[in-house]
């Protein structure tokens, strides 16, 4: 019997064990090695039998022999067949992965493994059915195998490609409720658990190699594993756990609507349908909560959020394609568990509000709300032992963040269309509330603000914010008055809509919180920044708003706002009067402002004779005005009435068109020339430029600074001086 016949006979009897038992004796014989290679290729026995045999008799000696004997092509073939067969074998998952890990960690295997198709293997390794997540404290066989593949430069890209493709494949789950069948939900639940498992697995692998030094080196442009994995983790996180926040909000809202419908008069069929929908939504919520409330997920979020903060504050972090996702993730984390305002968090907030880290207005607003929640939380915590003023003063980093508001407001305002500006009412309310609590409440904080607005640009931003807040005050107050009129009309009806009345009363109470906040801000601005309130850009807007309110509330018009149970509302006209009195007392307290106010109000068409005096009467009846305040306001009203009478005698005198502002058609008081050589009133054009940085006549870009610079030209100065002479001559004739 030939040697080859002996080998085949032994192979038929003992299969792979024949090679193991005889290797040390026959390994140098060419026929023996050829038979082993042919056996592995499936040329002697079918491949299914071969690899079942190998898996059943798997041991160290066998792998040593195969690694040493198999030719390169056959080694690759072995890896392919072995992997495919072991994946479909009945062995326990953990046993399979241990065997695969052992094979794939061999030196010769690692040298050729880049030629293998690892897609099926990676899908199996990362698709744990029973375990969603795990901690760093326990390394799994999945982790060990992937770590083996990541340590090999040739296979590392394939592992990263798997996670990157997974991230790209995740789509938001936003099906209509009617399409959320048990089958669909079961499939989605399976996917979400798969996504979460992969997220946690990748994080564990990344965290295994990360430290503070390496964290600083992470860059979006880097091809290194730690950098690429970091951004993939953030991408998956944004699409899963972070995305669940909005999904949960939607479901809770829908469940609330369903509960209201179930409590109403509906048919049995409608009731059945609604209960089914409710159960569907609760089932979906249960899965989400199972993930996000998991202890290990929370530990991961806590740790990873800290690493994100460190990375942001210790690198040249700038607005980029992925930065918004990273900041969004961080915001969601801190929404669930409020941050401490340490040095790093302060830096992040400042740079977000200043537009360094993001240009996204919605993201800025989200962080603004987060900052407000922080302040509310510490107020609630400290209010029993400390005054608000004391605890706010304790943390000066708050003021450092707050002084960025003016830049943030400017950026948000300019990023929106003119018809969208009103949509930022709530963020403006939040900003204003924070300002009222902080820089307007603590002397040391105001020093920071004073220093900030010494910069002309920041001063302009501050003026924009004051101007916008005045308009907010007007809008909100107008809405309150309109709502009161609607309630009065409904109460007068033969069949009043009680549900509408109740809802509208609630709306008024909400609007009153806004109104009070904006009014308090205006009062404090009148006190601390009198020059700002009476500057050319703001004074007319401010006085118009106040005089219109007085016109509505100190004349017969006030009757239309009186409704039943008025005292039960948060809103009251008398409270408005208290605010207005404070505003004027602060303004008048500054030397020369009294005459300025008399002139400004006397020329204002919105002033109603003796309106201040009528307001005083209401305040006296409330015992809400001091004798000194009474004297001041009464004298102011008297002087305004005198000036008004004088001006009324001159009503028939029309100023020539050439001396009138082309925008408002009123006599120009302070002439200034636009770049297209049109002379306008400075007060009028400056108010326009607070809202819109364009020339109203040609829509070209224009700012206050550009306008002032243009008016420094000698030829412009000459034309303005000539105009002033004509203006002076006209006024003298009067």
Image (cartoon, rainbow, N blue to C red):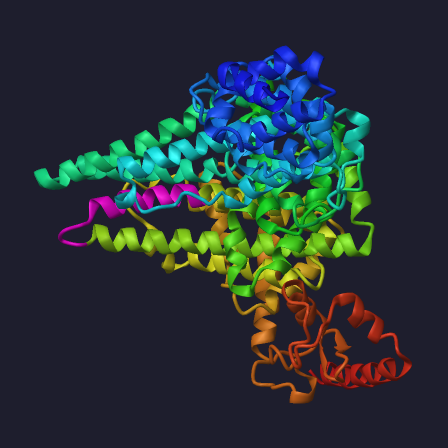
* Position of 544 relative to 67 (above/below): below
Q: Is residue 505 visible?
A: yes
Q: Quadrant of residue 110?
A: top right
Residue 26: in magenta span: no
Residue at the limit of the structure toward the right, as seen here: 714
Q: Is residue 368 visible?
A: no
Nearer the observer, 652 or 578: 578
Side of 510 where 202 appears, left or right: right
Quadrant occupied by the C terminus: bottom right
Nearer the observer, 671 or 314: 314
Q: Quadrant of residue 282?
A: top left
* Position of 74 relative to 29 (above/below): below
* Position of 350 relative to 19 (above/below): below
Quadrant occupied by the N terminus: top right
Residue 380 percent across, percent down from the top left: 55, 22
Nearer the observer, 241 or 344: 241
Q: Quadrant of residue 653?
A: bottom right
Nearer the observer, 283 or 92: 92
Residue 79 percent across, percent down from the top left: 60, 30
Find the magenta span and give its range. Answer: 493-511
Residue at the limit of the structure toward the top, as seen here: 21
């Amino acid at each position: 019997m030939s040697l080859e016949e002996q080998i085949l006979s032994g192979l038929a009897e003992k299969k792979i064990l024949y090679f193991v038992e005889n290797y040390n004796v026959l390994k140098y014989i060419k026929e023996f090695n050829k038979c082993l290679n042919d056996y592995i290729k499936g040329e002697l026995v079918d491949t299914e039998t071969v690899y079942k045999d190998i898996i059943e008799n798997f041991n160290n000696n066998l792998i040593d022999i195969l690694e040493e004997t198999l030719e390169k092509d056959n080694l690759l073939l072995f890896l392919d067949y072995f992997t495919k067969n072991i994946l479909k074998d009945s062995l326990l998952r953990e046993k399979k992965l241990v065997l695969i890990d052992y094979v794939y960690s061999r030196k010769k295997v690692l040298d050729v493994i880049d030629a293998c198709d690892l897609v099926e293997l990676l899908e199996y390794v990362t698709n744990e059915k029973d375990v969603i997540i795990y901690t760093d404290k326990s390394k799994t066989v999945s982790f060990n195998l992937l770590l083996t593949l990541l340590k090999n430069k040739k296979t590392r890209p394939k592992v990263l490609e798997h996670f990157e493709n997974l991230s790209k494949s995740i789509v938001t789950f936003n099906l209509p409720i009617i399409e959320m069948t048990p089958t669909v939900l079961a499939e989605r639940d399976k996917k979400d658990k798969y996504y979460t498992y992969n997220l946690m697995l990748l994080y564990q692998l990344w965290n295994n190699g990360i430290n503070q030094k390496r964290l600083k080196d992470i860059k979006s442009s880097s091809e290194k594993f730690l950098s690429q994995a970091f951004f993939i983790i953030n991408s998956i996180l944004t699409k899963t756990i972070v995305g669940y926040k909005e999904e949960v909000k939607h479901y809770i809202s829908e469940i609330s609507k369903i509960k209201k419908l179930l409590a109403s008069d509906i048919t049995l069929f409608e009731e059945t349908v609604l209960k089914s929908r409710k159960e569907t939504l609760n089932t979906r919520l249960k899965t989400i909560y199972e993930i996000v409330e998991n202890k290990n997920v929370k530990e991961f979020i806590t740790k990873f959020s800290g690493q994100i903060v460190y990375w942001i504050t210790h690198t040249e972090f700038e607005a980029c394609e992925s930065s918004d996702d990273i900041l969004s993730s961080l915001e969601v984390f801190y929404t669930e568990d409020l941050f401490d305002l340490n040095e790093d968090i302060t830096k992040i907030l400042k740079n977000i509000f200043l537009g360094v880290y993001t240009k996204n207005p919605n993201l800025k607003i989200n962080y603004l709300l987060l900052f407000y929640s922080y302040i509310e939380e510490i107020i609630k915590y400290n209010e029993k032992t400390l005054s608000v003023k004391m605890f706010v003063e304790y943390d000066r980093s708050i003021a450092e963040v707050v002084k960025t508001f003016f830049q943030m407001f400017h950026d948000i305002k300019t990023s929106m269309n003119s018809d969208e500006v009103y949509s930022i009412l709530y963020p403006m309310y939040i900003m204003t509330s924070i300002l009222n609590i902080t820089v307007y409440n603590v002397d040391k904080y105001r020093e920071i603000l004073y220093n900030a607005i010494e910069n002309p640009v920041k001063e302009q931003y501050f003026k924009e914010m004051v101007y916008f807040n005045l308009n907010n005050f007007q809008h909100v107050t107008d809405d309150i008055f309109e709502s009161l009129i609607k309630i009065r009309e409904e109460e007068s009806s033969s069949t009043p809509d009680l549900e509408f009345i109740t809802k509208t009363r609630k709306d008024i109470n909400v609007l009153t919180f806004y109104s009070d906040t904006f009014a308090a801000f205006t009062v404090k601005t009148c006190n601390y920044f009198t020059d700002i309130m009476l500057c050319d850009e703001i004074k007319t807007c401010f006085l118009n708003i106040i005089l219109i309110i007085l016109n509505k509330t100190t004349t017969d018009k006030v009757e239309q706002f009186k409704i039943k149970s008025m005292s039960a509302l948060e809103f009251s006209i008398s409270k408005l009067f208290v605010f207005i009195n404070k505003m004027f007392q602060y303004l008048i307290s500054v030397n020369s402002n009294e005459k300025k106010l008399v002139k400004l109000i006397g020329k204002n068409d919105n002033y109603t004779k003796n309106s201040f005096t009528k307001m005083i009467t209401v305040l006296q009846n409330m015992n809400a005005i001091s004798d000194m305040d009474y004297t001041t306001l009464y004298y102011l009203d008297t002087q305004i009435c005198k000036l008004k009478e004088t001006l009324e005698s001159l009503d028939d005198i029309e100023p020539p068109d050439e001396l009138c502002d082309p925008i408002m058609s009123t006599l120009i008081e302070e002439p200034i020339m636009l770049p297209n050589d049109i002379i306008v009133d400075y007060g009028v054009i400056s108010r326009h430029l607070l809202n819109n940085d364009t020339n109203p006549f040609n829509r070209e870009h224009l700012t206050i600074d550009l306008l002032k610079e243009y008016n420094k030209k000698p030829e412009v100065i000459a034309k303005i001086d000539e105009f002033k002479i004509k203006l002076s001559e006209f006024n003298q004739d009067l």
